[in-house]
Image (tube, grey):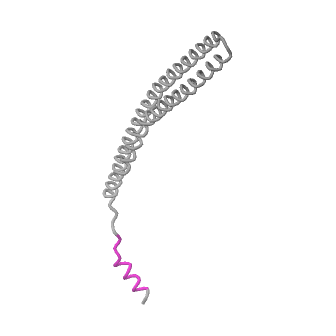
Amino acid sequence: MSRTKTAETIENVEFPSFDASKATDQMRAFAEKGVEQSKEAYAKLKTGAEETQKALESTYETAKAVSSDLSLKTITALRANAEAGFSHLEALIGAKSLSEVVELQTAFLRKRVELTVEQAKDFQAVASKAAEDVSKPIKTAFEKAIKEIKAA
């Protein structure tokens, strides 16, 4: 009895037919979607790389200009210090007494300290501006990338 029942069940079971054309269409659609997603990812990567390159070029140009400004500021400070030193030496040579030498030396040192403080402030201002200018293109590119990531 169980054999007859099993035979009847096997005869009544229907297997779904496999349609190769539908499978091919599905595979083609899947492949096309993958290709399209790859193209989009490549386009985004290319755009990001180009923007990064522009930011780095801008940063390099800014760093070059800032370096030039700092060099000129340094040369100006060195020239002023050298001229002040030579002027002081000439004044010391012309001194007639020890008290005049002490007075000249005291005045010179006071002026040197004041000038050194002023030069340090100038260098600090130029260096702060330089750091801000150099980092600005990279900061802008980074902020843009973060906004795009948040939007996606």
Q: Is residue 71 above or below residue 22?
A: above
Residue 113 point in image, percent of width and height? 57, 27
State the residue lying farthest toward the bottom.
1
Q: Is residue 121 above or below residue 15?
A: above
With 64 as the anchor, is 108 left or right in this view? right
Q: Quick one: 125 or 34, which is closer to the camera? A: 125
Q: Is residue 14 magenta?
A: yes
At 38% from the left edge and 78% from the top edge, which residue is drawn?
10
User: Which quadrant of the figure contains the N terminus?
Assistant: bottom left
Residue 18 point in image, percent of width and height? 34, 63
At 45% from the left edge and 25% from the top edge, which residue is drawn?
65
Residue 53 point in image, percent of width and height? 43, 33
At 40% from the left edge and 40% from the top edge, which residue is drawn?
141
State the residue lying farthest toward the top.
94
Q: Quick one: 16 or 78, which is closer to the camera? A: 78
- Prevailing secondary structure of the magenta residues: helix
With 127 as the anchor, is 98 left or right in this view? right
> What range of the chain is rendered magenta?
3-15
Q: Is residue 71 magenta?
A: no
With 102 as the anchor, is 49 left or right in this view? left
Counting labels gives 0
Residue 41, quarter of the rendered image = top left
At 68% from the left edge and 16% from the top edge, which residue is drawn?
98
